Image (spheres, grey):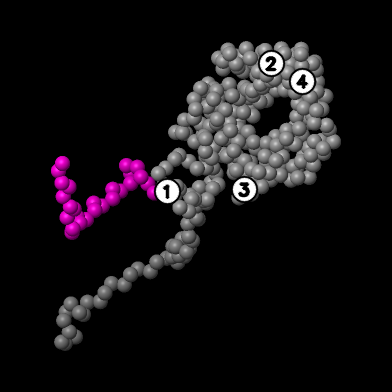
Amino acid sequence: MAGVPAAAQEVAPVAAPTPAPLATAAAEQASVAPPAAKPKRRHAKGDSLEGFNRAMFSVHQVLDRILFRPVSMAYKKIVPKVVRKGIRHIFSNIGEPLVFANDVLQLKPKRAVKTFGRFLINSTVGIGGVLDVAKTRDFGLPHHDNSFGDTLGRYGVGPGPYIFLPLVGPSTLRDFSAGFVQGQVLPYTIDTPFGRAEYRVSQAVLTGIDLRAELDDALKALLGSAIDPYATLRSAYLQDRAATIAEARHSETPKATDPLDDPLTDPAAGPAKAAPTPVDDFPVDPAPPVESGPSAEPAPPAAPSSTPAPATPLP
């Protein structure tokens, strides 16, 4: 063609047509979005069974409202206080040999001697433990709690995951397992009457409703205005157990490096930091304290004053 450069006369190559099946497959692959990753279920540190525990806590709340608390308060109202205290003292005195055994296992001879003396006095002068004579001024031997769970914690066994069961209450894997083992000591060593079902059921019922009646005011104060009653009860229980284990280890405070090692704070709070961080269980302080440690930025130097300070006359 005249007047048209030869380069312009070249025809651009035509792309080869894509086979229909391949084109359809490519279009479908492009239209299908990759599946979204499922968010991981979050739980507080030390409470890996939180979903299960919260469900059990809800069941417990219902049972406590319709059954456990009404029965406990009726027991407290009907049974005279002196009778309730006598029953409480009897079961407490029966458990003193187990307290003594754990005192020995924890290498606390002075405490073990006091526990043995308390058991001996209340079993004789106290008429089989009905009267707590040992705690009076004449003897000065008050009751102290001690359990196989405390002994395990004394020798470094961690608490394990937090557990909550209806009508049982808060516990940990260590304490729940240790409590089960300790509960079998008397039935398998003495048998009658401790191994009989009648005794075990009556002990569980009487001690349970008596404890629930005595703790009614404390539970109202603790959970009545709590934003998250489950987390509040969990935190209070773990703090109490941490203090007990710390005492068994002859230390004032437990180690704070591992939140699962009997923490003094709620496991959801994590390790202590300079500035508060959001957590699941508790709201963040709206007015956190200003950092004053070495991590805080140094204040800028003050600008020199335009007016010279008056000279101090020498003496």
**Most foreground residue, 163 or 71:** 71
**Residue on which disc 4 sits:** 131
Secondary structure at badge 1 equals: loop
Q: Which mark is residue 138?
A: 2
Residue type marked 1 = Pro
Rendered view: 82 above or below 193: below
The mark closer to the camera, 1 or 4, is 4
Q: Which mark is residue 289?
A: 1
Q: CA distance from mark 2 to mark 4?
A: 14 Å
**Residue on which disc 3 sits:** 226
Task: Please report whichever mark, 3 or 2, sits nearer to the chain's N-terminal start.
Answer: 2
Pinpoint residue 12: horizontal percent, then vertical percent.
26, 74
Pinpoint residue 167: horizontal percent, then vertical percent.
72, 37
Q: Magenta region: which residues? A: 289-315
The mark closer to the camera, 2 or 4, is 2
Q: CA distance from mark 1 to mark 2?
A: 51 Å
Whether residue 97 is visible = no
Q: Residue at x 55, y 23 (%)?
A: 248
Q: Which mark is residue 13?
A: none
Task: Please report whichever mark, 2 or 4, sits nearer to the chain's N-terminal start.
Answer: 4
Q: CA distance from mark 4 to mark 3?
A: 38 Å
For residue 22, what is the image quadrant?
bottom left
Secondary structure at badge 2 equals: loop
